[in-house]
Each structure stands twice: as structure tokens, then as C-alpha cells.
Image (spheres, grey):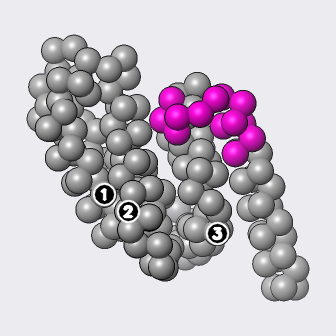
């Protein structure tokens, strides 16, 4: 692959920040995680550049960094964070913000693997095979993580809705 590291990093940065923010639930932690990942990618650039899908390799590095961080700081509290991407025009921005905060809170209640699988599928629109490659598991396990994660999200959302009624 004849891609320069600087070009690659610039092209991947917005997507990595959004992915990391959705994965961690904290904008500052997401920025630190992306920075660490890009530094590690620079140090191993020949390996990253020679991968079949360097962008997936980079996401795998990010997830591994997140899991290592979670092991070191196991008592941290996950707080909902707004999407750092530019806003699109909406008739009611308050409703959109409330929906994002609710979704971030729901995702924070999932386990790391399920949260990563759901974020990769629905936020990044990745296939089962791509997600399996990033998470280091079989595609059937990815489908299981997504199915069980969505079921858990539905239960919590229904319980919240019942309390609000």
C-alpha cells in the first residue's frame, strides 16, 4: 500500500473520534484513546499499511487500547457524550440531544464486546466479517453479541418507558 501515514491519519481521524466517543462514552477519553492509537500506528506503520484493511486494523488497535484502559481504570464512571460530528438541521434539536443522551446511557450499560459490536454495526455500518476481524472472534459470535446487546437495550428502554408512564 502506497499511502502516506499523514494522509491516512488525516482521513481516518474524524471517524476514529466518533467511533471512540461512542465506544467510551467520554469525549476526552476518546480523544486520548485516538491519540494513543495513532501514535502506536505510526510506530508500526509498515505493519498497518501492509494490512488488507488498514482502517479495520486501526480500529482493532483502538479497541485493544480501550480494553487495556478499562482494565487499568476499572472504577471509572461512563458518562454520556454528544456525538462530536457536525449537527444536521433538525426541527427540534432538543429532542435530538435527548435521544443521543438516552442512547449513550443505554450503550454505557452494555458489556465492552456487545457495545463495540453494536457501535461497529450501527454507527460504522460494518459487516459481520469486518466486526469479527476487529473484535477477534467468529462472525457468529458477532451476531450473538449484537442480538443479545439489542435485547438488553430493548429491555432497559421499555423499563424506562414504563417508569415514565
Alpha carbons under labels 3 and 1: distance apart = 20 Å
Q: Which residues are magenta?
A: 133-145
Residue drawn at the location 52% of the way across and 62% of the way down = 90
Alpha carbons under labels 2 and 3: distance apart = 17 Å
Circle on res. 18? none
Is residue 134 part of the magenta span, yes or no? yes
Mark 3 or mark 1: whose residue is earlier in sequence: 1
Is residue 159 part of the magenta span, yes or no? no
Give the quarter of the image for residue 112: bottom right
Residue drawn at the location 41% of the way across and 39% of the way down = 60
Is most of the magenta stretch helix, strand or loop?
helix
Q: What residue is shown with label 2?
A: 69
Mark 2 or mark 3: whose residue is earlier in sequence: 2
Mark 2–mark 3 CB contact (< 8 Å): no
* Residue 29 at x, y percent in the picture: 33, 67
Is 29 rendered above or below residue 33? below
Mark 2 or mark 1: whose residue is earlier in sequence: 1
Bin the neighbour count of mark 1 within 10 Å (Cα to Cα): few under 14, some 14-19, many 20 and up.
many
Residue drawn at the location 26% of the way across and 18% of the way down = 50
Tag 1 secondary structure: helix
Q: What residue is shown with label 3?
A: 109
Which of the two marks, 2 or 1, is nearer to us in this view?
2
Mark 2–mark 1 CB contact (< 8 Å): yes
Tag 2 secondary structure: helix
* Residue 2 at x, y percent in the picture: 16, 15
Which of the two marks, 2 or 3, is nearer to us in this view?
2
Give the quarter of the image for residue 154: bottom right
Q: Is residue 14 left or right of residue 10?
A: right
Circle on res. 33? 1
Bin the neighbour count of mark 2 within 10 Å (Cα to Cα): few under 14, some 14-19, many 20 and up.
few
Along the line of sight, the residue nearer the viewer: 132 or 13: 132
Amino acid at each position: 500500500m502506497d499511502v502516506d501515514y499523514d494522509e491516512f491519519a488525516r482521513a481516518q481521524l474524524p471517524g476514529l473520534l466518533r467511533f471512540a466517543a461512542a465506544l467510551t462514552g467520554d469525549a476526552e477519553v476518546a480523544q486520548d484513546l485516538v491519540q494513543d492509537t495513532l501514535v502506536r500506528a505510526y510506530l508500526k506503520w509498515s505493519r498497518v499499511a501492509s494490512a488488507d484493511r488498514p482502517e479495520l486494523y486501526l480500529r482493532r488497535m483502538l479497541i485493544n487500547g480501550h480494553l487495556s484502559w478499562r482494565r487499568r481504570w476499572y472504577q471509572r464512571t461512563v458518562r454520556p457524550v454528544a456525538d462530536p460530528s457536525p449537527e444536521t438541521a433538525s426541527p427540534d434539536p432538543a429532542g435530538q440531544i435527548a435521544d443521543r443522551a438516552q442512547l449513550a446511557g443505554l450503550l454505557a450499560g452494555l458489556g465492552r464486546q456487545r457495545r463495540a459490536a453494536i457501535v461497529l454495526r450501527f454507527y460504522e455500518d460494518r459487516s459481520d466479517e469486518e466486526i469479527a476481524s476487529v473484535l477477534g472472534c467468529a462472525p457468529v459470535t458477532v451476531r450473538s453479541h449484537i442480538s443479545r446487546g439489542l435485547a438488553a437495550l430493548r429491555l432497559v428502554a421499555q423499563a424506562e418507558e414504563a417508569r415514565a408512564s
